[in-house]
Amino acid sequence: MKLGSGIFWIAAIYGAFVLLAGLLGEAQFNIASPPAVTHPEFYYGFHSLALVFQIIFVIIACDPLRYRLLIPVAILEKAAFFIPCLVLWQNGRLNSSSSIFVGAMIDGLFILLFAYAWIATKYVNRDHSPQQRDP
């Protein structure tokens, strides 16, 4: 359970740091990724909603077994950014050296880690002792 908890704490802290930087960094984003943001409501809406989701990661981190049903939702949250970025990269619309692509790949890694935590919690009882697996 410690590993599952740690995975979600790392995701929450990393996500909060990156997303807060994004909320405060529209001007830098405009320089790094021209043209400038033309619909700030989408820019700030994305960062704000993703930042709110970090709270769900903290909730899961506090008790991964109790909140196991939220783990697939957390996987979907990461996939909602990872998959479109991967498709955009594959179609030549996203540069692999961009910070957006790197962030998407980190989300891809979190998908795998969240899936591991979800599978691992299946075999743990409420008292955190290992459960016998069926053959």
Image (tube, rainbow, N blue to C red):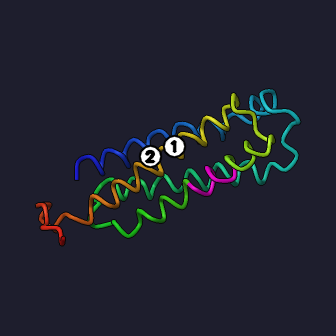
Q: Residue at x 49, y 58 (%)?
A: 75
In the displayed structure, 88 sits above or below 135; it is: above
Majority secondary structure of the magenta segment?
helix
The relative height of residue 120 versus residue 47 in the rendered view (above or below) is below
Judge by depth and name the residue closer to the eye, 67 or 121.
Answer: 121
**Percent position of residue 7, x then y:** 36, 46
Q: Which residues are magenta?
A: 79-84
Q: Are marks 1 and 2 in contact (CB under 8 Å)?
A: yes
Q: Amino acid at mark 1?
A: Gly
Quick check: 112 above or below 64? above
Q: Position of residue 4 (x, y in %)?
A: 30, 51
Q: Residue at x 76, y 39 (%)?
A: 94
Label 1: few (<14), some (14–19) or many (≥20) C-alpha neighbours in 10 Å: many
**Disc assigned to residue 54:** none
Report the side of 64 relative to 30 (left or right).
Answer: left
| Residue ID for mark 1 | 15
Residue shown at 55%/58% (left/top)? 77
* Residue at image point 37% right, 58% down: 59
Q: Where does the image place residue 68, in percent across and percent down from the top left?
A: 33, 66
Looking at the image, how many numbered discs can be counted on the residues? 2
Q: State the SS at label 1.
A: helix
Amino acid found under the numbered disc labelled 2: Ala
Numbered disc 2: secondary structure: helix
* Residue occupied by mark 2: 12
1 relative position to 68: left or right: left
Q: Position of 97 compared to 106: left or right?
A: right
User: Is residue 7 on the magenta stretch?
Assistant: no
Structural distance between the alpha carbons of marks 1 and 2: 5 Å
